[in-house]
Image (tube, rainbow, N blue to C red):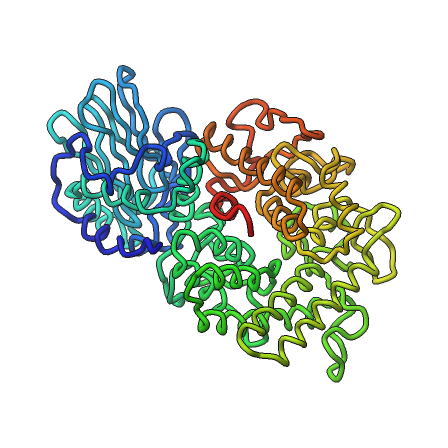
Amino acid sequence: MAIRPLTAFALAAAWTLVAPLAAPAAGRDAFPPPRHVPSVFGEGLLMAYSGLDGETHVEPPVVATLAGEGLTLQFHLEGEPALELVLPKKYRLSWRAVTGDLLLADVAGDELPLVVAFASWNLVVGRLPPGSRAGLRGSGPNTVIMRDRAGDRIRFAFACNPLGPRQAARDAAQGLKVSLETLVESRLRFFAEAPHGHDNLAPERTRTLAKAFSVMRVNTYAPEPPIAVHWTTPSRWPERLQNPWASALHAIGLVHLDPALAKEELAAVYATATSEGLIPGRSGPATSEETARPPMLARAAWTVYRHERMRDREFLRASYTAVAKQMEWFMRNRRLGGPPPPEKPLTFGVPLYAWASAEEAATPGSPRFADGAEFAAVDLSTFVAAECEVLQRMAQALGYGVSARTWGRRAEAVAQAIRDHLWDPDSGFFFDRTAPDGEWIRVWSWAGLAPLAFGVADDAQAARLEEHLTSDRFRAAAGVATLGSNETAANGKSWTGGAWMPLNYLLVRGLQARGRTQAAHDLAERTLDAVTRRYMEAGTLDEFYPGASAGAGASADIFGGGSTSGNDGGASDYFPTAAVFADLVLRPEP
């Protein structure tokens, strides 16, 4: 289902002269049923203009989060300006839409709804009930707020423009002329046309699914030179940039919303590759790192390719070319002990691989890296084996017979090296090692479960891993802990024992591939329940969830002290969480 044809309508709507906003009574297409629209209000909500509607910019980051008591939009700009909207206490709000670019609420005692919305990348407009106030706390050098009255009600426009306060004032003056009715209709039409899941889906999950698509929407950028297509970020704040591992996960969710958009955002990642094949770990219009991130682009591209009934072979060919080069870069530049001799195959010797750092592994703070990164890493080696196996399938589909056989041999060689050298039969777990037959680094982390998620473990090993997965060591109410509860560093947070939804997702898919349907169903349900509960309580889809132990079959109160106890400093409205939630709901079986 393509969503972007709404773009032209939304852009035109943003600059239509103001018309009175009556109590919404537009057609069903513009106003979908309430459970198809995210409407939970809470602190931490990410707000920004979507690249699906028009121009966006990484700099300055005109992005806000809901903060403090009342209705305050805290902008992450120089001077930390906050847009404070204060309503008399007599008003009670009933939220109808709480999305990344629109706040819409019915107001008890007023026949017209409250509206706050992004009208363009640098402009927030709205209307408040009689007696309300709109003002700025703090002030950036290029920010302006203007107010006007529409009868007894307050109209306001907040603008930021890097060209200076005079241009910001012009933008704000134009913002006071925006047709709020048209703007609201354009925003809600997105949810009318987005997937809603099956008819028997619980209302809370349906609404959380709508929130997932809202998160995808707000974390999508428009083309910005030198990026020629739409691209995505895990979070418009604080991350802001493109990340290839996250983008791979994004594509798996975006394909349900708009397959063309999923292909575009992957193409944006491929375009960042160096001539040697490195795809930078973070990149943007004016930024590019020299380190990598976990490779999973082949899996994402294969998922997108197989989703469409009319298979896009040009997309598959472009994906194969980019990812094949990336994987050869990994196999040369991250091989433990250095690259193989030039005359030898890439799998010469014992093909195991080491990260450059914990940051490259995307797990900062993990105790695996307490003494550096020079070790045979279970997770990276597993990623390499899995990507080689998918490249084999891609090559077969493209008719590249010789290349398919080469990638198949590489996949099996790396997988066998993992099984032979990184499996500890006494513990029944995969651990990192300082060398193929060197000292064990016995940290019970999610990396040891990666061979189960990606099909590298043999049947006996997989059975032992499943025992650990369902034990108190790793089983959490929110899914799977990133660090075993027996580790000294484990605190149930982030990469030291928190729950990361993409890890849950990968393990669900790995269990399903092995026919372990009950274990997969149990983990999928805990994942969906955790995301739904957090959303219904706090209004956000978070990066990390508490790793509180669930025991066997327990249903602990994972959020303990309430809605603020969930994310532990990670990003709110996090695209990878939204993507895997959507895929588990809309594609319960792989």
Is residue 376 shown left or right of residue 140? right
> Where in the figure is residue 278, as x and y percent of width and height?
58, 69
Res. 85 image quadrant: top left
- Is residue 457 depicted above or below 89 in this figure? below
> Where in the figure is residue 562, as x and y percent of width and height?
53, 23
Is residue 538 shown left or right of residue 134? right
> Where in the figure is residue 481, as x and y percent of width and height?
67, 39
- Is residue 311 depicted above or below 463 in this figure? below
Q: Can residue 208 be seen by looking at this rendering?
A: yes
Res. 230 image quadrant: bottom left
> Where in the figure is residue 268, as x and y percent of width and height?
45, 64
Q: Nearer the viewer, residue 73 or 252?
A: 252
- Is residue 306 depicted above or below 127 in this figure? below
Q: Can residue 285 be seen by looking at this rendering?
A: no
Q: Nearer the viewer, residue 84 or 211?
A: 211
Q: Residue at x 74, y 57 (%)?
A: 377
